Structures are given as structure tokens and as C-alpha cells.
Image (cartoon, rainbow, N blue to C red):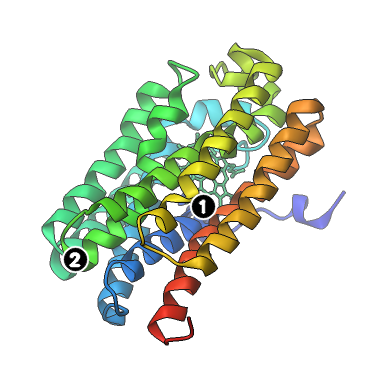
Amino acid sequence: MATQTLVAPSRFVEFWQLGKPRVVSLIVFCAAAGALLATPQWAVASHVAISLVGIALVAMGAAAVNCLVEHKRDAVMSRTARRGTAKGTVLPWEAGLYAAALTGSGLWLLATFANALTMWLTLATFFGYAVVYTRWLKPATPQNIVIGGAAGAMPPVLGWAAVTGTVPPEAAVLFLLIYTWTPPHFWALALYRRLDYQKAGLPMLPVTHGPAYTRQMILLYALALFAVSLLPFAIGMSGWLYLAIACWFNAGFVLRSWRLYRTHDEQVARGLFFYSIKYLAFVFGGLLVDRLAHVIGWV
Ligand code: HEM
Ligand SMILES: CC(C)=CCC/C(C)=C/CC/C(C)=C/COP(=O)(O)OP(=O)(O)O
């Protein structure tokens, strides 16, 4: 048996994991992109940094509430069974207190150092994910992540609002990018974790409509995502450098979705899930590199 399965994680690690730090790190990166794209020049670094800390704390608080609400379902699924809340090593009141402390301090930072609009939008995002998605939509409908994806798509809007106090159409385009990306991101994982979701009684698309229909939907969303990813260039938010990066990663996304559509293979689904994470990081990174190239007068 591998050594790591014998060693119990420390309490610190258990609490840290409840905040889903890897997911939140990409959320914060997308929020940073929103903040840095919000003004023609880079915004003041300390202001951006403190706003991002606020957003990160609330996102981790929302994730901890998700683990608390779902501790029974998490205990049934192999992917989530090791969470402290699922094993019972983190008690419900401890998780609740931890989530309240993270969320409260994050909202306080945003209200004090960013602005009221950002604080309220972040609170609405928290509510959208921790309550509307987790408590109501997830156990109720296979469209759970299509509707609930609106919460996950908010980070660039929050970053933008933190810097300017407004939410212009450019921020809405960044929202749309993550919103269209979320279904193929999640359904790819749900395809190779289908039995887990079935066991937990969750109506995810591969469980309710089967893998073939899910693969078809993934391909359609991948094509829609390609179109949406061209919007930043089309509305003059970015230049050719972004366009080239976006086209490259979208080609990869559509190609992998096509391969998945043609072959029912769990390894291909797994590959697409991990590619989706790389895709989002590089497309948002592409927007930043493109802006940097303009700011320093390189293009
Ligand atoms: C409602 C929307 C979303 C759903 C249902 C969803 C679902 C999932 C699930 C089930 C996992 C596996 C987590 C694990 O194994 O611990 C995952 C992983 C991940 N998600 Fe999402 N996701 C959503 C939105 C997002 C957003 C908005 C981002 C970032 C902007 C994101 C970034 C990631 C990353 C980086 C991982 C990999 C985590 C790791 O390596 O441990 N997701 N997602
Ligand atoms: C305030 C703010 C910016 C909040 C962001 C909201 C947020 C944390 C979105 C991430 C979405 C996410 C972790 C989905 C995981 O799906 P799941 O919860 O169904 O996955 P699980 O089965 O692993 O619990």
C-alpha cells in the first residue's frame, strides 16, 4: 500500500482542502484577469491584490459550505469521500464556523478596500454557489451546472467591479466565456465519474440522459465556446495575439470534444476534463499577455 494512504492528513490540511484550493486558484486567476483588463493601464497592484484576497476568502468559504451541505453525498463518492466533512473528522459546527470566518473576513475586505458593488456581487455569487446550486439545483435537475454555472462565471466580473465599481459589456463577455466553458468542463468529468454520481443519487446529465447524449452536448458547447471566445477580439477588447492563442486552444478543445463524441472512451473524457482547466488558464492568460503587449507598446 502506498505510504500516503496510511498517513492521516493534519487538521490544517483537512480544513485547507474544504476550501477547494485548486479550483479557487483558477477562480482567483480569472478574477485577476478581470481586474487587470478593466483599465487601459494596469490598475494599482495593492488594490487588486487585496480585492483578490477578499474574493479568494469568500470563494473558499462557499466551497466549505458546499462540503458541509454535501457531507453525506460526499461520503458515498470515491472522489470526495476523503474530505474531512465526509469522514466526520471535521465536525459540522467546525466547518460552519470555518466557512463563516472565511466568508465574513472576505466580504469585510471587499467592503473596506474595494467597493460596495463588489461586496454585494461577491455575496450574491456565494449565495448562488453555496445555496442555489448546492442545496437546490444539484439534487434537482441535470441542468444544475448550466444554471449554477452563472456563479462560477462571476470571478472576472468581480475583479472588474473591484477596480472600476462598474460592470460594463466587456466584463459580461468574460462572464460568458466561463459560463459557456462550464458545461463541457463538468460533463467531461461526470462522464468518467458517472457511477459515483449514480451512487449518490445525483441527476447529472450522463446519469439521466446517458453518455451518448452528454458527449453530443459537450461537442455543441465546445463549438459555442469557440464562437464566444472570439468576442473579446470582435468587440476590440483584445488584439491579434489573443486571437491566435484563443484559436489554438479552441481548436484543441473542439478536437478533443469531437474525439470524445466519436469514441466512448473514459480516458478521452478524462483528457478533455484536464484540458478544459488548461484551456481556461491559457485563454485568460492570453488576454493578459495581449494587454501587456499593448501596454508596453510591443504590438
Ligand atoms: C458550477 C460550475 C462548476 C462545476 C459543477 C465544477 C465541477 C468540478 C468538479 C466536480 C471538479 C473535480 C474536483 C475534485 O476532484 O476535487 C472540478 C475541478 C476543477 N475545477 Fe471545476 N467546476 C465548476 C466551475 C469551475 C470554475 C468556474 C473554475 C475556475 C474558474 C473551475 C476550476 C476547476 C479546477 C482548476 C479544477 C481542478 C481541481 C484539482 O485539480 O483538484 N471549475 N470542477
Ligand atoms: C464567491 C465566489 C467567487 C464563489 C465562487 C463559487 C465557486 C467556489 C465556484 C466553483 C465551482 C465548483 C468548485 C464546483 C465544484 O462542483 P461541485 O460543488 O458539484 O463539486 P464537488 O462534487 O467536488 O463538491
Which residue, given by chain and number where applicable, does mark 1 sit on?
Answer: 23
Toward which corner of the image does residue 236 lie, by quadrant? bottom left
Density class for disc 1 (Cα within 10 Å; few <14, some 14-19, many ≥20) is few
Q: Is residue 198 above or below residue 27?
A: above
Residue type at mark 1 is Val
Considering only order in the chain, which callout, 2 or 1, is on the residue closer to the N terminus? 1
Q: Quadrant of ligand 1?
A: top right
**What's the distance in space between the residues labelled 1 and 2, CA to CA?**
25 Å
Q: Position of residue 246 (x, y in %)?
A: 56, 57
Which mark identifies residue 164? 2
Towards the viewer: 204 or 247: 247
Q: Which label belongs to residue 103?
A: none
Compared with residue 26, is residue 290 higher up or lower down, i.e. above or below? below
Circle 2 residues within 10 Å: few <14, some 14–19, many ≥20:
some
Tell me: residue 129, above or below residue 56.
Answer: above
Residue 238 horizontal/vertical position (percent) = 42, 65
The percent coordinates of residue 243 (x first, y second) are 53, 60
Q: Nearer the viewer, residue 122 or 260?
A: 260
Query: Along the horizontal axis of the image, is 166 left or right of 36?
Result: left
Residue found 65% across the figure and 23% down from its top: 216
Q: Is residue 178 left or right of residue 208?
A: left
What kind of residue is marked 2?
A: Thr
* Residues at circles 1 and 2 in contact by the CB criterion of under 8 Å: no
Q: Is residue 193 left or right of residue 101?
A: right
**Residue 36 visible in the displayed image:** yes
Q: Nearer the viewer, mark 1 or mark 2?
A: 2
